[in-house]
Structure formats: structure tokens, C-alpha cells
Image (cartoon, grey):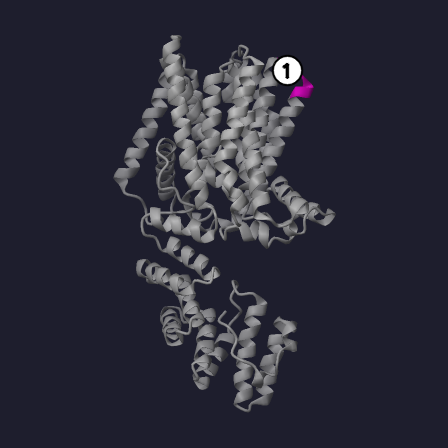
Amino acid sequence: MAGSVSGRRLALASGALGVATLLVFAQVRHHDFVDWDDPSLITTNPVVVGGLTAEGVREAWTGTPHWGNWIPLTVLSLMANVSAHGLDAPGILLTNVAIHALAALALLLALVRMTGALGPSLFVAGVFALHPLHVESVAWATERKDVLCGLFWMLTLLAWARYAEAPTAGRYAAVAMATAAALLSKPMAVTLPCVLLLLDYWPLDRWRDARRCVLEKLPLLGMVAVVAGITFLAQEPTMQLGERVALPQRVANAIDSYAAYLGQTFWPTRLAYFYPHPEAGLPPGRVAVGAAVLLALTGLALHQARRRPWGLVGWLWYLGTLVPVIGLVQVGSQARADRYTYLPMVGIAIAVAWAAREAAGARRERRLALAGVAAVVLLALGLTAHRQVAVWRDSVTLRSHAVAVRPPDAVLEAGLAGALVSAGRTEEALAHLDEAIRLEPSWTPARLMRAKGRMRVGRVEEAIADYRAILTTEPGNARARANLGLALARSGRPREARAELERAVAQPRPGDVAPERWARVHLGLARLLAAAGEGEAARSARSRALALDPSLAAEAPPAGAGTPQAQ
């Protein structure tokens, strides 16, 4: 069990850790929400926007999961932010920073309590607090779930350290409550009981009674099973990519991601908000090298386990905590994500910190030199993280950075185009859509977006060409056909426009088009029919429009209204 660390030294270390964290992240007070998930979780989520209300609290626990994640505590914390200071990005982001700083402090206290070693513990907590890979978890409002889960995860470690010193029912209850809170913040905490087992091996040295160590985790594993079951059911609709990508390809991407995370831990460059999944597969040589590195490090950790248990614990922490997000069960279209390293990197930092401590030995000059190296490493991480925080200032900055640092990719180009359109910079957006279509000529969403942008800036004939190109390969695309009809009407070709709109409304409404938007397609047809003197047909089309969106009744009669916007 741990030795003692003076309260004064621990207080100084804690203060330095907190100040450094705030210096790196304080700039978020000037940031805005971004268009990457923030709208769906926060800015257009009626549960969050409404603040803390009785109905909102009920909905947080029983409502629709956010992108497959059942995260009631996270939603409640965002609701509390809104109640306190409105729908304000700096307020939510600064709360993220505060939670992250508290998590780093709790990690420091837990490691010091378990090991009695202040220096290595401070280094691990500093890496957790300042690493550039962790910027995404803190500077992105949507990732409240990461920092909140991280705080309760670290509090669980601290509670477990207390329980290991003197096992009592009260201390175990504290462990259980902190574990439950971590799970309710983000399902990634399902591996937390396994990490407690690792800590029982080292540094707590409790594996002499292995049976008891396992039995103590069973109630926690029961909570994990419940949350895992709910999460699986919630994520089932978002697992389409897993159905498109064969298991061998998913395994290859998992191996590559393990190696990539490890590399970025030691050299955090070219970080981006999105790394597209290589659905077509990865080069076999690259996967083989990654697998060889992982196997070699695993073999080394096992071989040295008796003499250097911290190496095995740190490595298994890293490998194990990444399992839920490594892509063997693929959710979403990303290959990997910076935020997924938020908890796993602690294991690598533990292995490095205690390896360095052993290398320095007991000689004072070596330990001073090691402290200097550690300080330089943390300073470099903090400066790099500070620059990475600036990337999250707004949507255009975030997406421009990704396009600049990653290999050419249609998804990244289209994402930047969307942000530019929202910022009123449509001409710039069109250049990036041209590039996206050059990279992926058959990608319909990019063509639809470019056509709509061309319509917005008056390049109607080019938009018509885009819509016709889509319909050449996808004749059943009702959205493209409806927009082609509207574009033709705008270009003064009512007969062609009417034919296309009639064919469009004869099809079911596309699932990604809201009823009120589709209502305007019917209304556009009604106007053309009215202009052609077909009053009865016009009234019928207008009735269908009003059935989808009754608010259109206040608009001018079909014959006297302008052409609606593309859908």
C-alpha cells in the first residue's frame, strides 16, 4: 500500500495541475457551438433547451437516446447549464473545462493514495489534463459525456483506493455510486470494473485473495450489464456501417486504430475532428506492422509482469478500455476519434511514468533530471493542446483545419462546405463541393448540396445540370426530382417543371425531408397548375400542401406566390 505524501506538496501539485489546465482551455470562453453534433444534442434538442423542468428530467431518463447513447446524467448536466445561464456556448464549454480539471485532480489524488508516489502520479494526471488528443473531449460541447464520465471514473478510483485500505459497506457504496454515475454519463465506462481488478493487482497488491477481488466486482458488473444492454438496443439503428464492412476489415481497422492512437499519444500531430472509415480496406502491410507492434508490447508486458507490474497494468488498461470503441462493433462512419483516448491514455501514461521512475533510481540528481524532462514534456503537450483548442472555435475553423491536415477526403470537403454555407459564404462552399465531387463523383449528397448552393447564388442552369446528373443514375430520387422541378420553374420552363414536380409528388416523401419542406413542393406544383388555368388541380395540390403544413394557409394564393426554395 502507498506511503505518505505531505499535504503541502500535494496541495502545491494540485494547484499547479489546476492552473495549467485552466490556462490551456480558458480560451473556450470565446468559442461557439459547432455544427458537428452540437445541434442534435444541445441547440435543437428541446429537452436541453428547455432547461431543468420536471418533464425534461423525465425525458432525460426515458426519452430517445442521443445517437445510440443513453446518457441521462450528461443530459441533465446540460439542462442545468441552460437553466443557469441560457443556451450559451461559453458557459457550457467552461463547465466542461471545470469538470475536466476536477477529473485530473481526482486522478492525481487516487494515484497518490494508491502508490504514495507524487511525481509519477502528477505526471500521469498532467498528461490526462493537457494532452492534445483530449482537447476534443473538453472543447466540444457535445462531449460533456466524456468529461462527466471521466470525473466519475476518477472518483471511482479514489473511492476504490479508500475501500482497499479498509473495506466497509459504506466505502463500497461510494464505489458503486461513482461507478453508476460514470455509466449514466457515458456507456464507455463499462470497462471500469475490469480496471479496478487491474489496480487490485498493482499497486494495491490485493490479488493474493483473487476470489474476493472478483466477487467484489460482481455487483458493479451487474450495473455494467444493464447499461450495456440498453446501449446495444439504442445503438442498433446506427450500426449500418457494421453491416457494410466485413468482420476482417473491422478487425484490421481496430488493429490500425490501436497503433494510431499509440503513435498519436507520443506524437500528437494532424489531429482532426473526423477520420473517415477505410471501408475499402487498409494496406495489409500497414495492418501487419500494427499487429506486430501490439503483439510485441503485449509480450513484453507479460514477460516483465512480475518485476514491473505497472507495465502490464498500464498496457492492459489501454487495450481494455478501448474495446467498446475500437470498431469491432461499428457505430457511425469514423475509423477512430481523438475523444476515444480520453480514458485509455491513462494506462499508457502510468506505464511510462513508472518506467521512468525506475530508470531514474534513487539518486537525487537523476530524479531532478527526470522531473525536468517531465516538466518539458508537459509544457510541450500543454502548448500543443492550447493550439488545438483554438481549432474548435467555430464550425468553419474546425472543418477547415481538418481539410488542411488530413489527406484529401470528400466527407471532409463537404463538411467544410456545409459550414461555409451556414456562414453565408456560399461561393467558397461551392469550390469545396467541386473538390468533394471530384474525389467521389457518384456521391449524391454532395451533388445535392452543390445544386442547392448553385441555386442560392443564381447559377440555376448549373443546378439543373446537377439534378439531371443525379437522376441519370438514381431515377427514383424524389428529392432531386422535386428540386429539378423547382429549378426549372425558376428558369422559366413551367411545362418541364410541372412534369418533374408531378413525378416527384407521386413518390413517397423522402425520409430526410421534413413534412413542412415537402409541403412546399406540393405548393410549387399548385402554383404552376394555377398559372396554367387548372384551378381544380391547383386546389387539390394546395390541399395536399396544407395537410403537410397548415401554416401555409397564410401564404398568397397559388397563382400569386413565388417559387419555393429547393428542398
Dot 1 amino acid type: Pro
Regarding residue 329, the answer to whether it shows in the image is no
Residue 176 lies left or right of residue 334; in this view the side is: right
Q: Which corner quadrant of the image does residue 73 belong to?
A: top right
Position in image of residue 554 (x %, y %)? 65, 77
Q: Which corner quadrant of the image does residue 250 belong to?
A: top left
Q: Is residue 250 above or below residue 160?
A: below
- 97 and 495: which one is in front? 97
Q: Residues within 10 Å of mark 1 (few under 14, many from 20)?
A: few
The total of numbered circles placed on residues is: 1
Residue 512 lies left or right of residue 246; in this view the side is: right
Position in image of residue 336 (x %, y %)? 41, 42
Q: Residue at x 53, y 65 (%)?
A: 513
- 296 and 136: which one is in front? 136
**Magenta-tinted stretch:** 166-171
Position in image of residue 184 (x %, y %)? 61, 37
Q: Residue furthest bottom?
A: 533
Q: Is residue 262 above or below residue 352?
A: below
Residue designated by label 1 = 167
Position in image of residue 118 (x %, y %)? 49, 17
Mark 1 falls on what kind of element?
loop
- 283 and 146: which one is in front? 146
Confirm whether the magenta stretch covers residue 188: no
Q: Residue furthest right?
A: 54
Q: Is residue 62 above or below residue 189?
A: below
Confirm whether the magenta stretch covers residue 170: yes
Q: Residue at x 59, y 89 (%)?
A: 535
Q: Residue at x 44, y 59 (%)?
A: 420
- 131 and 163: which one is in front? 131
